Amino acid sequence: MLTAKFDQLVKQLRVLPGVGQKSAQRMALHLLTKKRPQGMALAQALDDAMRDIVECQRCHSFSDDAVCPLCQDPRRDDGLLCVVETAADVMAIEQTAGYRGRYFVLGGHLSPIDGISADDLNIDQLVWRVKQEPVGELILATGTTVEGQTTAHFISEAVSRHVDKITRLAQGVPMGGELEYLDSMTLGQAMQNRSFL
Amino acid sequence: MLTAKFDQLVKQLRVLPGVGQKSAQRMALHLLTKKRPQGMALAQALDDAMRDIVECQRCHSFSDDAVCPLCQDPRRDDGLLCVVETAADVMAIEQTAGYRGRYFVLGGHLSPIDGISADDLNIDQLVWRVKQEPVGELILATGTTVEGQTTAHFISEAVSRHVDKITRLAQGVPMGGELEYLDSMTLGQAMQNRSFL
Ligand SMILES: [Zn+2]
Ligand SMILES: [Zn+2]
């Protein structure tokens, strides 16, 4: 609209979730008018994150290094392992500040319709891990969607010989809800009241 | 929360207008999970725009070059000059697709409270321009705030010897607006300036 570089910026800003043409224009004008150093810092942070953030070798969440801070933290309880679908779920549970165990990220849920089978998720790695390093409790914190429930049951079968105590988050997580959008209070309660599968 | 580079990205995303902690996290996770090439393209577009977009020497809007496309376009009418506060206003008027003249960006409005006087705006440059290049009509499209009105009057005085026809945008009831939600000042003005159907 104004210049080629402006148009390019507006177009690229629209890749952000929830940002349409109008907000992208507003963002571009705001940065150009008053926040150029901050705009450059954002460009740098974006580039760094996109290039350097990798998958943690142990939990498959995001990490700057081979093993993430949550896996390295010596104060976390090794006897508790919480299995989630995505790194966003790790973040959501961490924000409740009520869980002190470890995490394991599956990378999604089983979904025959979308062609996502067990091989597409980190399920083998999870089975291998609980075989090598026994845990006192495995918390299957997948979503409460049909796919999430199916995934939990599938994992439960796969690890049953290696884990005595397998639990699910308590009722309180609304059906069809994605963990990452849940408020911390509900999520924290659900973690505290988790039940046997 | 997850890693230092993730936290840094979330922090920098919050410089965008309308983006709080939750949306910044959601944006970062979305890019990292599914849109890394697009995230890098956004970083590049941001950096390019912040570094390379300058002020057009003629109209003081944004430009990739010394003179912007709107000032260079030979199909625009040199006899019409529309004076606005910001480049965002140029963009808003361009989107109506109903104006084919040139623009001049003041860089704000007079505001004694904020210490913004005529010297802080491009008013001298505007006076110089209409002296050098007479225009048939000068449209003072500054805001309808007190400051915008004051700015329009100030400019009107400053250029009166050089321009015959000075106009203001029509004030009235906005399209699709319900009368009951309109402020009484606007409604009173609209009533006073009513026209034949
Ligand atoms: Zn990890
Ligand atoms: Zn220009």
Image (cartoon, coloured by chain):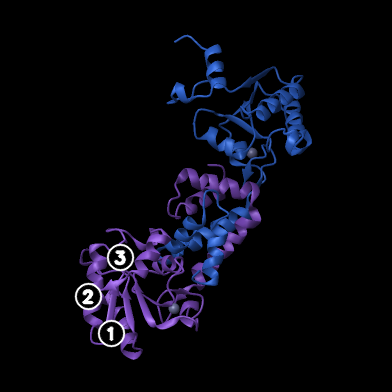
Chain colours: A purple, B blue
| Location of residue B185 in the rendering, given as x and y in whole percent from the top left corner | 57, 20
Q: Check the image and report above or below for B155 versus B5.
A: above
Which residue is located at x 71 percent, y 20 percent? B163
Of the two numbered discs 2 and 1 on the same chain, state the one appearing first in sequence.
2
Q: Chain of mark 1?
A: A
Q: Say if disc 1 is inside 8 Å of ligand 1.
A: no
Q: Secondary structure at mark 2?
A: helix
Q: Is the residue at mark 2 from the same chain as the one at mark 3?
A: yes
Q: Circles 2 and 1: CB distance less than 8 Å? A: no
Q: Which residue is mark 1?
A: A163
Earlier sequence position, callout 1 versus callout 3: 3
Q: Chain of mark 3?
A: A
Disc 1 and disc 3 on one polypeptide chain: yes
Dividing the picture into quarters, in which one does residue B134 lie? top right
- Mark 2 vs mark 1, foreground winner is 1
- Image region (quadrant) for ligand 2: top right
Judging depth in this view, the residue of B47 and A85 nearest the camera is A85
Q: Residue at x 50, y 70 (%)?
A: A51
Q: Residue A20 versus residue A3: which sits nearer the camera?
A: A20
Instruction: Residue type at mark 2: give it.
Output: Phe
Closer to the chain start, of discs 2 and 3, is 3
Marking on residue B138: none
Query: What residue is at 44 percent from the left and 66 percent from the top?
Result: A96
Residue, disc 3:
A143
Q: Nearer the viewer, residue B51 or B145?
A: B145
Q: Is residue A119 visible?
A: yes
Secondary structure under tag 3 reads loop
Image position of B197 with respect to B51: above or below: above
